[in-house]
Every structure is written in structure tokens, then in C-alpha cells.
Image (cartoon, rainbow, N blue to C red):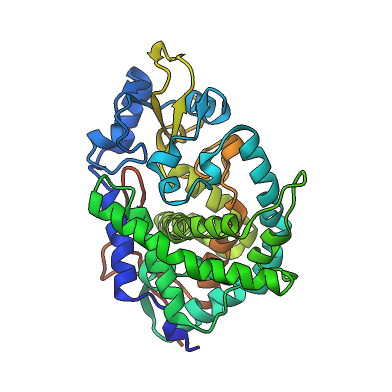
Amino acid sequence: MSTSQMTPNKDLAEGFAQIGALFAGNDGNLDQIYREHRATMPVMQGDICAELGAASFAGDTGRPIYTVFKHADVMLVLRDTKTFTSGILMETGLGQFLDGLMITGLDGDEHRQLRGILQPSFTPAVMEEWREAYIRPLIQRYFIEPLIPLGKAELVSSVGVMFPIHVVYAVLGFQDDDPAALELFASKALKVLGGMANDPEAKRAAFQAFQELYDPTLAAVQARRESGATGADLISRLIRAEFEGRTLTDHQITNFVRMMLPAASETTSRTFAIMLTHLFDHPEVLERLRADRSLMRKVLDESVRYDSVTTFKVRETQTEVTLQGVTIPRGAVISACVASANRDETVFENPDVFDIDRKQMAAFGFGFGAHMCIGIWLAKVEIEEAVGLLLDRLPNLRLDPDQPRPEIRGVSLRGPDAVHVIWDAP
């Protein structure tokens, strides 16, 4: 396979940009808006995303919606899974396309058992194995080496959009010899996220895309099971996985694999672009990282705190509850504003300063508690390798002075539209 085949096609790049625009909204004064809410209206009746003109993960269920802004309240909502349940995500999120198997939309014993089956396949030890076997060689070969002679590039479209999808495709164990099939998977995954909008046509396209992903994924799962499922790839691991006597059917594995694709094509891609933007905005941090790669995780964690990609977590109240003096009825939708909580001045010292040396406190960019993102370690390893390889292989990597500086924007889904760079080509 030639390296040029791994660059995203026009439809894929446009789909990624359209998703960003869908969730962008009027984001010009977000930090101030959230600061004022924390001070004067920490619990707001209504959906702040809708007020700011962005698509909302809270959906349109007809139920009352409350937005919470303070760190303590967001932590309570994410920690107390009995009072604030996740089943609403099966109606408003990806669960509406997943036939009932979405780990983030499950609660109680069902969630505990499913996570018990899945978690051993996503441990840091497994990620280190995949780092060497799949992640580093794949990113280097298909996304970094083709850039070296060019001297300039836009990194969101040339690297960020596609590398996480390709990594997930590889760790699933799909054959890496059909770039057209890979791009098809990626483009359909992006269409699924478009179905989050309150647009009947977008929802139809999303449902169709997920249906079209089902058959080839199921065939791969069945073939792996028939061959004994002895490999280190994710599908084989899931076939072998067992927890408290429970295993996964081929249908369940297929749905889990489909669920991974939209997350891979969005969260990791945008976090990568956000981290690069912060590095270029803080040259002193970039120079420290060039000299000491052990700082990579600190830079990544602070990037996720400072600018989370997915800025709201949605829950549903199972009983009447009072937060900050506001009584919220049973059955209401809670939109927990992660972006505000991660800048709460009562928790983080100088929260609006990008500081990789700050004392580590609970931040919510990858979720929290029982519903912490199961793929967190995979995402971190992918991003660390992509950023590290860029710095290793593209000498004197820097922003292109002839192009606009990258700007992180978005209300409910954040990230820069583009990161234009140059380097000293050989």
C-alpha cells in the first residue's frame, strides 16, 4: 500500500469539518459566560448549548433540561450513578443506533458486568503492547514519513482526521491492504455523529451508515471466532473475554466495534489538534517537551483539562434532587458542563492558565467515575505517538507564518479547524 493512500479523501475531510460546524455554536465568549454562571447561576434551567446555537448531546426529548457548571456538581452528577443515570444516552446519543449495547448508556449491574468483560482489553499493559505492534509503526509509516520531504502541511486534514481511525482499524485486526475499505469505514463513522443533530435527514443518514457498517464488521467477528480467536487484536480479545461467567455474542462485539469508530474519528482527532495548538501557543512548553519526552502525558492531561473536546456529559435524574438551591424534578435531563467544571476557580489555581506543572485534580475531559472513557489509554497512547513522531521526524516544526494561527473553538465539540505548519525539509 502506498503511503499517499492514507490521506483522507475529500468527503472524509469535509465530513469532519461539518461535524465541527454542527457543534460549534456562538462560542466567542465561553470562558466569561461559564465564569458568570459559576458565580451567579451555577444551575441553570435550560440547555446552554441551545442558547448558544450549538447542537446538543442532550437531544430533544421534551423533558426539562438543567445545565450545571460547578466542579462539585459535575462531579456529583458523574459519580452518583443511581440518582443520575445514563440511559438517556440510548435515546439522544449513539445508543439510538446501537441496538441497546452502548456501555456509556448502561447503568447498575448491567454496566458493571459489561465493563468487566471489556476492561481487560483496554488496560495500560495492552496499550503498550499495541503501541509497539500497531500504533507507532502505523502512524510513522502512513502519516509522518510521507510528510518529511514536503516542508509544510495542514495537520488536521493530513494526519489528525485519519490516524486514529486507521489505528482502531488495525487493532481490531482488519486487513491493512484495502485503503478504500478503510476510508469507507471512516466516512460512515463520521455520518453517525452527524445524526446527533435534530435533523431528520441527518438521523436517517446516520442510521443507514451504522447499518452499512454492521455486515462487514459481523463477518470479521465471525471469521475470527471460526479461526480460534487466538490473536492480540481487539476482536480476538473480546471473543475470549469473560466476566462472572458472561461472554459476548458476535452481535454484541459487532455493536461495540461500531461504537468505537465515531469516538475514534472525533475525540482522539480533535484532542490531538488541541494539544498541538497549545504547544504552539506556549513555545516554552514546546521546547521543554522537545528536550524531555517524559513530559508528554503532563502536556496531554493539561490540554484535556484546559480544552476538553466533548464539553458536556448528559444524565437523567431518577428522583427529585436539589443542586445549588435549585429543585430538579425526577426525569429531568442534566447537562453537566465539563468545560466549565475544568476551569472552576475553587478547584484549580489560575484555571485559565495553561500550566503542565499544576497539581493534579479531578478533571472530566475523559469522563469520570464508573463511566470513565474505556478507551482513555488507547487515545492517550495514540496522541502521544502522533505528537512525538511529528517532533522527532519534522525538524524545527513550527507554525506556518503565511497561514492563520490555529484557533480552538466550539461550544459542545471543540477543536481547531486547521493547524498549518512548516519544518526544515531535507
Instruction: Decide if residue 339 is in sight here.
Output: yes
Q: Position of residue 41 (x, y in %)?
A: 33, 19
**For the image shown, how many numbered marks are present on the structure?**
0
Question: Where residue 395 sits in the image (x, y, percent)?
Answer: 49, 76
In the rendered image, the vertical position of residue 92 relative to residue 171, given as above or below: above
* Quarter holding residue 368: top right
**Could you say which is closer to the camera, residue 424 or residue 54?**
54
Residue 393's place in the image compared with 127, above or below, is below
The residue lying at 40 percent from left, 16 percent from top is 329
Could you tell whether 295 is left or right of 344 in the image?
A: right
* Percent position of residue 30, x then y: 30, 37
Residue 17 drawn above or below residue 92: below
- Viewer-nearest residue: 147 or 196: 196
Q: Nearer the viewer, residue 396 or 99?
A: 99
Residue positioned 26% across, 43% down in the render:
54
Q: Is residue 210 left or right of residue 175?
A: left
Residue at image location 53% in from the left, 31% down from the top:
78
Q: Give how far across and how far down residue 3 sits, in percent.
A: 47, 85
To which quarter of the image does residue 156 belong? bottom left
